[in-house]
Image (cartoon, helix red, strand yellow):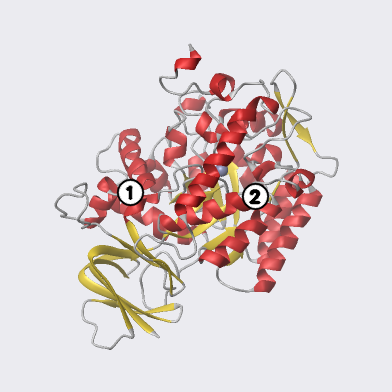
């Protein structure tokens, strides 16, 4: 069957970059695009009319943690001062002897078996990504059972997932006074590493393009040199990309220097992990950042020379008063910039806008982090980080991962007159403007509706789960905070 998508604007691809076409079309047959241009003469079995829309490649979200993020909702405008704005340390580490609820990513295997939230988290996550026009995403290290649930949802809803059961050699724990400490596993994390490799092999044997494996040693400060070396070797053997969190946190930066005498980026370099196959979560707190007061570092140069990718998650970090020091310097150094949503909202359009505006401010240059650059990061950059030349672009032979964004919708004035649809998208758009999503040549969402998914029901289920989590926070929070003590709701009459 041959399908033609007619668009007011079509983001085509030629000579190594995106090229805008006015009144163009994209044609696909099966899973692949067969034509992109303005002069199509052949027939079509089906026509999708997007003549009021921008037609572009599906977004690639390179930093996702499964969940509805009810716990993270308690962090905005507050949180522990001693954790330097690092969300995961503040809400995902349970007090000794207790079990966290509402965030399954860091559960132990025993805890994961009985966790009631895993299926809901996965359903919510993949539906939210799809609703926002994400056709490919990377999950950064949730528990193997989380990956299992995501796998099911990826195949059910038709979103491409790079799934990586996270592993480490130990993890953060919290005592009854709320103090955090690093605690090593007796086997150095071998059981988790083996489970990750086993999962990836299963994915590869299954063999479809909707689910792929990725190796994710979760956070660098919790990974031994040995497990990082094994990661590099396994990535080569399995032919899969790698992702980790590094240069993401003041405490992590300091801990790694104290333990290894190297910055987190230098540590990655020393084990051979700094390669184009690596996506580093955040890498905003590196030796070059003036915020760390580190002298003589060369992290940016190392990352650029080795052509690594970073998943920049602008909304997630600026909300916690953190920032990428300079979009412009990273680009000039040769770092492949990609965009991730990390927490919430999983809206790549809002994330592009935040990346652009903060990129300008921090680069001290109004021409930096242009709409075109952030759009490239959300499409081509993400594809490059996964070693793929068949996604993130609309080109003959590429996967038919196509979205339409209703920039001329009749019920809003937000876009105003459109001179350049990419600038309008980045400046005035939101994820809900995405109308149709096609992945691997199949329509997965139409008119904002995902067949078989009731968004209202999903949100209500997440609300119910959230209420339960908020009511019980003190049961596992290291400081025994109640939800109101942790995050006073705005104008709350009960909190005086
Ligand atoms: Zn992350």
Question: What is the quadrant of the N terminus in the image?
Answer: bottom left
Question: Left or right: 28 with respect to 481?
Answer: left
Q: Please identify the quarter of the rendering in which residue 472 is found.
A: top right
Residue 392 in the image: state x and y as whole percent. 41, 64
Question: Left or right: 284 with respect to 474?
Answer: left
Secondary structure of residue under mark 1: loop
Q: Nearer the viewer, residue 135 or 282?
A: 135
- Residue annotated with mark 2: 118
Residue count near mark 1 (Cα–Cα under 10 Å), binned few <14, some 14–19, many ≥20: some
On screen, residue 133 above or below 69:
below
Report whether the residue tagged 1 is closer than 8 Å to ligand 1.
no
On screen, residue 18 above or below 35:
above
Q: Nearer the viewer, residue 159 or 238?
A: 159
Residue 494 in the image: state x and y as whole percent. 49, 16
Counting every numbered tag in the picture gives 2
Instruction: Give whichever of discs 1 and 2 has the lower sequence position.
Output: 2
- Residue annotated with mark 1: 430
Question: Left or right: 404 with respect to 321?
Answer: left
Q: Nearer the viewer, residue 298 or 43?
A: 43
Residue 319 in the image: state x and y as whole percent. 43, 32
């Amino acid at each position: 069957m041959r399908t033609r998508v007619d668009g007011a604007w079509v983001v085509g691809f030629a000579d190594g970059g995106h090229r805008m076409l006015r009144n163009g079309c994209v044609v696909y047959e099966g899973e692949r695009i067969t034509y992109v241009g303005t002069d199509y003469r052949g027939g079509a079995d089906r026509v999708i009319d997007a003549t009021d829309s921008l037609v572009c490649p599906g977004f690639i979200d390179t930093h996702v943690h499964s969940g509805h993020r009810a716990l993270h909702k308690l962090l905005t405008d507050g949180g522990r001062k001693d954790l330097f704005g690092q969300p995961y340390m503040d809400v995902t580490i349970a007090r000794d002897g207790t079990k966290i609820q509402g965030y399954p990513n860091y559960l132990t295997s025993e805890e994961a078996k009985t966790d009631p939230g895993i299926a809901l988290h996965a359903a919510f996550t993949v539906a939210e990504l799809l609703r926002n026009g994400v056709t490919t995403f990377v999950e950064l290290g949730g528990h193997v059972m989380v990956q299992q649930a995501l796998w099911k949802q990826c195949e059910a809803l038709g979103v491409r997932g790079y799934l990586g059961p996270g592993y480490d050699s130990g993890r953060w724990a919290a005592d009854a006074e709320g103090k955090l400490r690093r605690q090593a596993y007796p086997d150095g994390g071998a059981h988790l590493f083996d489970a990750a490799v086993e999962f990836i092999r299963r994915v590869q044997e299954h063999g479809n393009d909707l689910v792929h494996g990725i190796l994710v040693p979760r956070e660098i400060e919790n990974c031994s040199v040995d497990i990082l070396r094994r990661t590099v070797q396994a990535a080569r053997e399995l032919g899969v990309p790698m992702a980790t969190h590094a240069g993401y946190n003041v405490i992590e930066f300091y801990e790694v220097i104290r333990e290894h005498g190297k910055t987190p980026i230098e540590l990655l370099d020393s084990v051979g992990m700094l390669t184009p196959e690596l996506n580093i979560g955040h890498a905003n707190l590196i030796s070059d950042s003036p915020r760390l007061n580190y002298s003589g570092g060369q992290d940016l140069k190392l990352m650029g020379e080795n052509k690594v990718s970073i998943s920049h998650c602008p909304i997630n970090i600026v909300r916690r008063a953190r920032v990428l020091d300079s979009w412009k310097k990273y680009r000039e150094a040769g770092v492949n910039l990609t965009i991730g949503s990390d927490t919430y909202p999983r809206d790549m359009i809002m994330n592009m806008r935040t990346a652009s505006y903060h990129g300008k401010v921090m680069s001290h240059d109004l021409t930096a982090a242009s709409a075109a650059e952030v759009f490239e990061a959300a499409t081509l950059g993400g594809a490059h980080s996964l070693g793929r030349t068949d996604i993130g672009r609309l080109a003959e032979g590429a996967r038919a991962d196509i979205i339409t964004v209703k920039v001329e919708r009749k019920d809003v004035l937000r876009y105003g007159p459109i001179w350049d649809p990419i600038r309008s998208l980045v400046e005035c758009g939101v994820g809900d403007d995405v109308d149709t999503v096609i992945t691997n040549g199949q329509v997965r969402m139409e008119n904002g509706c995902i067949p078989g998914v009731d968004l209202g029901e999903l949100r209500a289920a997440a609300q119910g789960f959230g209420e339960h989590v908020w009511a019980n926070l003190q049961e596992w929070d290291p400081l025994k905070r109640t939800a109101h003590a942790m995050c006073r709701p705005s104008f709350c009459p009960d909190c005086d």
